[in-house]
Image (cartoon, rainbow, N blue to C red):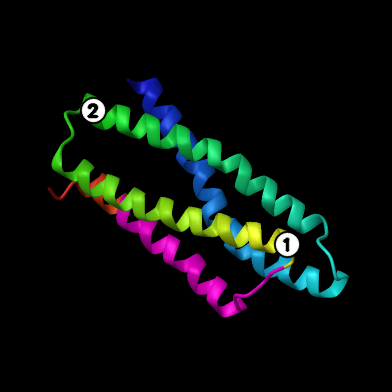
Amino acid sequence: MNWVKIIHLLCVMGWMTSIFAVPRALIYWKREHAKLGENGPLGDLTYRLYRFSAGLAAIAVITGLWLAWDWGFPVWSHVKIALVLLLAGHYLWTGRLVRRAQRGEFRESDMYLRIFNEVSVVGVIAILWVVVVKPF
């Protein structure tokens, strides 16, 4: 079971990199697009990071459910799963923003993207609190 936990943690770390970096990269992609009038290298890099992390997210979820099942799905794991689902929703919304950016559509302001980015940080802190403290 330790190997499953190690794989879970590695994949979570990779997924979190994308969750934290892609919304911020969209701000710079938007600025690059305004300068060039087309998508430049930053857009390609942002898209590739998002796409790569989708696989990590899937492995993180599968191994997380495997661990929860092995532990008998304690109450705190239900709370964690609910929070991870919210974070996954945030990730999917980020994907929508990336797909729009690929078409040259940047509707959201820099401020919106900054706040959107910070929401994920609050979500991750909540997940970490539930996992470490196990309040239920």
Q: In this image, 130 relative to 2: left or right?
A: left
- Amino acid under label 1? Arg
Q: Which residue is mark 1?
A: 103
Q: x and y percent of residue 8 in the render?
A: 41, 32
Identify whether 113 is placed above or below 129. below
Residue 47 lies in the magenta stretch: no
Q: x and y percent of residue 43 in the render?
A: 74, 57
How many circles with numbers are drawn on the protein? Answer: 2
Find numbered disc 1 in the image and state the secondary structure of the residue it sits on. Answer: loop
User: Residues in magenta?
Assistant: 105-127
Q: Residues within 10 Å of mark 2 (few under 14, many from 20)?
A: few
- CA gap between label 2 and label 1 equals 41 Å
Q: Earlier in the sequence, mark 2 or mark 1?
A: 2
Q: In this image, 24 relative to 5: left or right?
A: right
Q: x and y percent of residue 23 in the render?
A: 58, 63
Report the residue at 74% width, 66% height from top.
104
Residue 106 lies in the magenta stretch: yes
* Image quarter of residue 35: bottom right
Q: x and y percent of residue 75 in the render?
A: 14, 42
Magenta residues, dominant SS class: helix
Q: Residues within 10 Å of mark 1 (few under 14, many from 20)?
A: few
Which of the two residues, 12 or 33, is positioned nearer the viewer here? 33
- Figure quadrant of the N terminus: top left
Q: Which residue is mark 2?
A: 69
Identify whether 67 is placed above or below 124. above
